Image: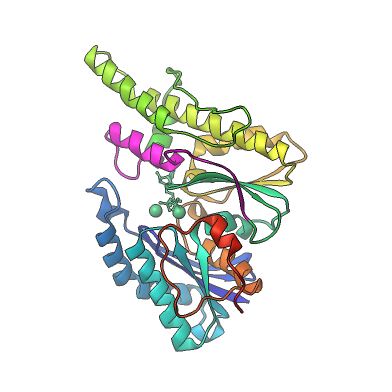
């Protein structure tokens, strides 16, 4: 069973082919980062235009990589949301055109379900499992009791982890996206500042990063006023320590409370070396828990994850009609509750 995935929710044009939901056959990602860098963030109109220019080329390259033709594909899975509406529409329309031209079933996929399913390209899921989703727009703890079921047990009340990374990076005048730059600097610095950690209520698995972000900005501002030189590396290390401490502590507590068998990490911030090391340290010694973290190229946006999640939706009987639309605010829970339309 071969599923072709298409992802265009933000600033990566991606097409991939996955066999049986677990085996990566082709994976092509055209990143637009260079075009958005000088604006310090993603410009929606530029993103849409690039997707239009790239999507056919990326598709051809994926088929070439797999040494396959469209006739051999069983279904087409596409990100329907969340994301930038104009960007989503390019992928959705490309998927519809392909499904129509080659008479293939069409499946809509929620982007975060995709990030989670990137892990299944490494290893089969064991339920119940807990997923720590840490991306540019989301920070959530998701409980999965079976394939296609997603229960949000904690989420950010303000900024997402990736967003906090990018905003702090911008304050430090680092290029966009800032996450990888802070990560690199953090390893060259020392934790010299005790930045706040938002633990919130005792029984809450929610997150909050805006206080931390403000604290970094205020610290930099105050130091500047007093003429004190703070090392960028130390700010990065101290900020990262605060983020990693909260993420890993809450994930571990939730894993224990819900008695899960696996903990899987998903989203762009899963590429963070500090987070990966801390999670491995925390979960590594626990015989009852298995930790899965995707390789770096499957952490940030790609279409392999969409094909992997799309395979599950397809086999559960989900089909999208010709009215499939981009939905910029499609939640994981609404996606999980959608009805099967065979
Ligand atoms: P969402 O998936 O929530 O819709 P998105 O698709 O924009 O948002 P991703 O592509 O999953 O987000 O991840 C991008 C984010 O990951 C950016 O905020 C980026 O700074 C962050 N990121 C990437 N690598 C690292 C790293 N090594 N350390 C920290 N953050 C990182
Ligand atoms: Mg991106
Ligand atoms: Fe993403």
The answer to whether residue 167 is seen in the rendering is: yes
- Residue nearest the observer in this picture, 147 or 54: 147
Residue 183 position (above or below residue 112): above
Quadrant containing the N terminus is bottom right
The answer to whether residue 60 is seen in the rendering is: no
Which span of residues is magenta-colored?
150-179
Is 162 magenta? The answer is yes
Residue 264 position (above or below residue 235): below
* Side of 230 where 268 appears, left or right: right
Quadrant containing the C terminus is bottom right
Q: How is the image coloured?
A: rainbow
* Side of 110 where 83 appears, left or right: left
- Residue 338: image location, x then y, percent: 58, 66
Occupied quadrant, residue 239: top left
Identify which residue is drawn at 34% across, 37% down.
Answer: 167
- Residue 287: image location, x then y, percent: 77, 38
- Residue 44: image location, x then y, percent: 28, 58
Is 43 magenta? The answer is no
| Quarter holding ligand 3 | bottom left
- Residue 305: image location, x then y, percent: 53, 61
- Residue nearest the observer in this picture, 202 or 232: 202
Identify which residue is drawn at 63% across, 67% down.
Answer: 312
Q: Give the number of callouts.
A: 0
- Residue nearest the observer in this picture, 29 or 151: 151
Residue 99 position (above or below residue 33): below
């Amino acid at each position: 069973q071969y599923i072709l995935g298409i992802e265009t929710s933000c600033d990566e044009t991606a097409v991939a082919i996955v066999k049986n939901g677990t085996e990566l056959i082709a994976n092509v990602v055209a990143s637009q980062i260079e075009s958005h860098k000088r604006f310090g963030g993603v410009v929606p109109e530029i993103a849409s235009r690039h997707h239009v220019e790239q999507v056919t080329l990326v598709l051809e390259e994926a088929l070439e990589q797999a040494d396959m033709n469209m006739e051999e594909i069983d279904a087409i899975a596409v990100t329907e949301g969340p994301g930038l509406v104009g960007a989503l529409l390019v992928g959705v329309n490309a998927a519809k055109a392909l499904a129509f031209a080659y008479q293939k079933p069409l499946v809509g996929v929620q982007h975060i379900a995709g990030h989670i399913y990137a892990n299944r390209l490494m290893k089969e899921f064991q339920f119940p499992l807990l997923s720590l989703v840490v991306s540019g727009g989301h920070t959530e703890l998701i409980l999965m009791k079976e394939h296609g079921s997603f229960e949000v047990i904690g989420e950010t009340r303000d900024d997402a982890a990736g967003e906090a990374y990018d905003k702090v990076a911008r304050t430090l005048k680092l290029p966009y996206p800032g996450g990888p730059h802070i990560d690199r600097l953090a390893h060259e610095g020392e934790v010299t500042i005790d930045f706040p950690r938002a633990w919130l209520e005792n029984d809450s698995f929610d997150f909050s990063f805006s206080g931390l972000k403000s604290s970094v900005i205020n610290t930099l501002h105050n130091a500047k006023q007093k003429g004190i030189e703070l090392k960028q590396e130390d700010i990065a290390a101290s900020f990262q320590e605060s983020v990693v401490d909260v993420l890993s502590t809450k994930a571990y507590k939730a894993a224990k409370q819900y008695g899960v068998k696996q903990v899987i990490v998903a989203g762009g911030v899963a590429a963070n070396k500090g987070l990966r090391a801390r999670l491995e340290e925390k979960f590594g010694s626990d015989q009852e828990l298995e930790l899965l973290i995707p390789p770096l190229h499957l952490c940030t946006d790609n279409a392999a994850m969409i094909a992997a999640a799309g395979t599950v939706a397809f086999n559960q009987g989900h089909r999208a009609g010709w009215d499939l639309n981009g939905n910029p605010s499609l939640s994981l829970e609404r996606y999980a509750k959608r009805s099967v339309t065979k």
